[in-house]
């Protein structure tokens, strides 16, 4: 789809806050649609996997026959952006997963689920993200994962003050531990749409 004027951007809509992503993408002029079936996935030029609960999203994706088509699309180079649970879905290795939980993989990273524990379940912080420029991004974390290990081909786009990685990029894949769809700051979605349109 790269190169076409208005590629369809899918948002995986099995569970989680897919409506917020669709709203942001549409506000940026994208043809954004909810994706629940393999036939719908086949039409998209890019895909967002939203936040929610990764173990539930994993089960539903397998139940609805989407897990294998999603894996194939990721490996074929489809631009995919995962936020929070979506980032967990994209990780090759998931730490603190529930028994039997699988991920789609693709990102050569290890992520730890619920990495901030119950003491600091949800919080906001300003992150300096060089690829997005000024001002810093106000990042909202909700029972968020962190990236504990990154492979050689992975670029860390953002880190917390303690050095833990919370935004990553690897080829066609983009991921954030936090939720840009909730803050009104559309720069991550714009960055992703540029990749879908083949600008970046
Ligand atoms: N803790 C959730 C999980 O493990 C992710 C939370 C979120 O997406 N906000 O999937």
Image (cartoon, helix red, strand yellow):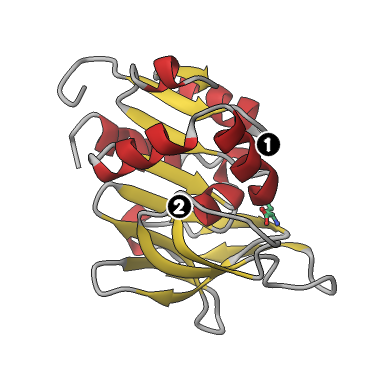
Q: Is residue 134 visible?
A: yes
* Numbered badge on residue 90: 2
Which residue: 48% across, 46% down? 82
Instruction: Left or right? Give the position of 154 relative to 159.
Output: left
Name of the residue lying farthest toward the bottom: 162
Front-most of residues 180 and 154: 154
Front-most of residues 141 and 69: 69
Query: Height in image: 141 above or below 198?
Result: below
Q: Is residue 79 visible?
A: no
Report helix, strand or loop for mark 1.
loop
Task: Where is residue 64? Give x, y as percent.
Answer: 57, 27
Task: Where is residue 72? Give x, y as percent.
Answer: 32, 38
Front-most of residues 167 and 56: 56
Task: Where is residue 48? Give x, y as percent.
Answer: 46, 36
Which residue: 53% across, 42% down? 185
Query: Height in image: 5 above or below 62?
Result: above
The residue indicated by pointer 1 is 16
Task: Where is residue 162? Give x, y as percent.
Answer: 56, 84
Name of the residue lying farthest toward the left: 3
């Amino acid at each position: 789809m790269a190169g076409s004027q208005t590629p369809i951007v899918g948002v995986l809509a099995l569970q989680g806050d897919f409506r917020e992503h669709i709203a942001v993408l549409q506000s940026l002029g994208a043809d954004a649609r909810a994706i629940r079936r393999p036939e719908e996935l086949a039409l998209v030029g890019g895909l967002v996997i939203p936040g929610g609960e990764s173990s539930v999203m994993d089960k539903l994706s397998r139940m609805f026959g989407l897990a294998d088509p999603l894996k194939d699309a990721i490996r074929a180079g489809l631009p995919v952006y995962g936020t929070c649970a979506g980032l967990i879905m994209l990780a090759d290795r998931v730490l603190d997963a529930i028994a039997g939980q699988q991920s789609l993989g693709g990102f050569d990273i290890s992520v730890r689920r619920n990495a901030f524990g119950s003491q600091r379940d949800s919080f906001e912080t300003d992150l300096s993200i060089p690829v997005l420029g000024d001002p810093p991004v106000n990042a909202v974390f909700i029972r968020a994962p962190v990236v504990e290990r990154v492979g050689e081909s992975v670029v860390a786009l953002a880190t917390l003050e303690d050095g833990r990685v919370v935004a990553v990029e690897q080829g066609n894949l983009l991921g954030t531990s936090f939720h840009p769809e909730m803050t009104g700051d559309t720069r991550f979605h714009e960055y992703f749409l540029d990749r879908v349109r083949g600008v970046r």
